Image (cartoon, rainbow, N blue to C red):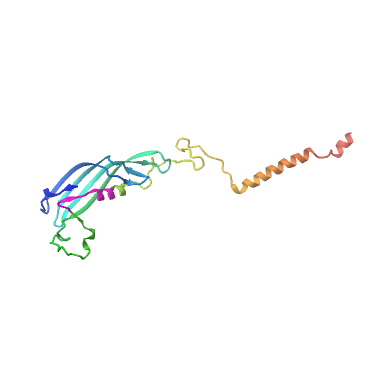
Amino acid sequence: MFDTHELGRRPGALQRLDRSVPAPVDLGLDGVIAVPEGSPVELELRLESVMEGVLVTGTARASAAGECVRCLEPLHREVAADFQEMYSYPDTDDRGRHKPADDEDGEGEDIVPLEDGMFDLEPVLRDAVVLALPMQPVCREDCAGLCPDCGLDLNQDPDHHHDAVDIRWAALQGLAGSLGTDEKDNMSGAEPGVDEKQEK
């Protein structure tokens, strides 16, 4: 939670904050890449008092860990995410006017209210960091990945390959092989020819 009381509801008042906070759980893309829980997230914040509330602009920097989607090797990425959010005074509308307690026009559904002058940055931080992370992280742009047949890392052996066999011809090759064997057997057991009889 962050405190805005120093701004004192004075439109135009500014406050700059540099904070290091521990990363919340599941800050990233599940099973792909994420900022480890508890690791430091460096925040640079600019709090500006306006008529409606407090406009928070900032940048978050952290180190994310995951694995390459091609070769499955561990990887680390530095991530920087910019964000901005308006935290409104709970008793004013979007023009800074006093809002009746029974206001049911539905316009306040998207308003993030200040709670006793405090605001929670985690939802905004989470959205910003997740959007800044790569959806398909790779250890390097030219990563060759794994062999689809045996799983060998092709980065270690770029010349690795398997002889392609068309399964449509595999049965015929086996049949041809068996026919060749039968023919040889028949030839070895054939009767002597005319020339052989004459020699005898």
Magenta-span inclusion, residue 38? no
- Name the residue nearer the viewer: 142 or 154: 154
| 147 vs 96: above or below | above
Rendered location of residue 115, percent (x, y):
17, 53
Q: Is residue 174 left or right of residue 46?
A: right
Identify the residue at image location x=84%, y=39%.
193
In this rendered view, identify the residue nearer to me: 53 or 142.
53
Q: What stretch is highlighted in magenta?
A: 114-128
Depth check, front residue: 126 or 137 = 126
| Tally of numbered discs | 0
User: Extreme front residue here?
Assistant: 102
Q: Which residue is drawn at 75% across and 39% down?
A: 185
Residue at figure coordinates x 29%, y 47% from the top left: 129
- The vertical placement of 24 against 198, above or below, is below
13 with respect to 189 (left or right): left
The percent position of residue 102, horizontal first and vertical second, equals 17, 64
Quadrant including the C terminus: top right
Compared across the picture, whether 132 is left or right of 189 comes to left
Which x, y percent locates residue 57?
A: 20, 49
Q: In which quarter of the image is residue 92?
A: bottom left
Q: In the figure, residue 16 lies in which quadrant?
A: top left
The furthest residue to the bottom: 105
Tell which residue pokes out farthest to the top in this image.
200
Any magenta on residue 125? Answer: yes
The x and y percentages for residue 114 are 17, 53
